[in-house]
Amino acid sequence: MDDQELINVGRSIAQDLDGILGDGAAEVRPRLVELLDRAEAGEPVRADLVALLAAHEELRRAVRGRLTGDQQYRLFDALPGDPEPQLPPRYVCPQGDQEWYRFDAGEAVPRCSHHDVPFVPC
Ligand SMILES: [Zn+2]
């Protein structure tokens, strides 16, 4: 799923947030809207957006429901061999300053932009 697809899904969820989260919507909405605006402005907030969308079971379900076919498998499912798909696999800089979520098994794990070392799974 590319950034634009992620934004589209996020916008759709933002519109329906009351129905998805009920009372919890008020807490999530400002952050979600902010991240979507920043993503559309080209800021590198993809990891933050994914983390937010992965933080609630209801949101994960809502994201899945908005994807089709291949994408549905690829978004929040664990990598092959992982028994319990729940959160996207999380990677961190060994120095602890950055994190990244792999929500597509075909995605290459990036390097920390500060330390120039590969992220490690955690
Ligand atoms: Zn780092």
Image: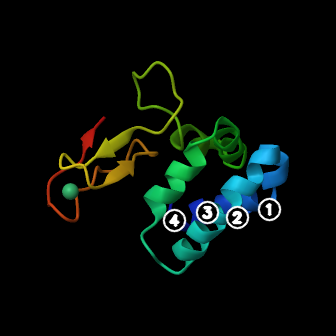
Q: Where is mark 4, residue-wise? A: 3
Q: Residue at x 14, y 60 (%)?
A: 116
Q: Who's the residue at 69% across and 38% down the image?
A: 61
Q: Identify which amino acid the numbered label 3 is placed on.
A: Arg
Counting residues from the start of the chain, the first of labels 4 and 3 encountered is: 4
Instruction: Look at the numbered discs 1 and 2 and tell me whether their residues touch, using CB distance below 8 Å.
Output: yes
Would you identify the image quadrant in which residue 37 lies?
Answer: bottom right
Spatial CA distance of label 1 from label 4 is: 18 Å
- Please state the horizontal and vertical placement of residue 13, each as a whole percent of the image: 73, 56
Numbered circle sitting on residue 15: 1
Label 1, label 3: how far apart the Cα atoms are = 14 Å
Query: What quarter of the picture does the C terminus occupy?
Result: top left
- Residue 98, located in which quarter of the rendered image? bottom left
The residue most toward the left is: 116
Find disc 3 in the rendering and name its residue: 31
Disc tally is 4
Above or below 118: residue 87: above
* First along the sequence among labels 4 and 2: 4
Q: Earlier in the sequence, mark 1 or mark 3?
A: 1
User: Relative to residue 83, is residue 8 drawn left or right?
Assistant: right
Whether residue 8 is visible here, answered yes or no, is no
Three-letter residue code for mark 1: Gln
Q: Which mark is residue 11?
A: 2
Q: Position of residue 44 (x, y in %)?
A: 42, 70
Instruction: Determine contact: label 4, label 3, CB under 8 Å.
Output: no
Is residue 16 visible in the rendered structure shown here?
yes
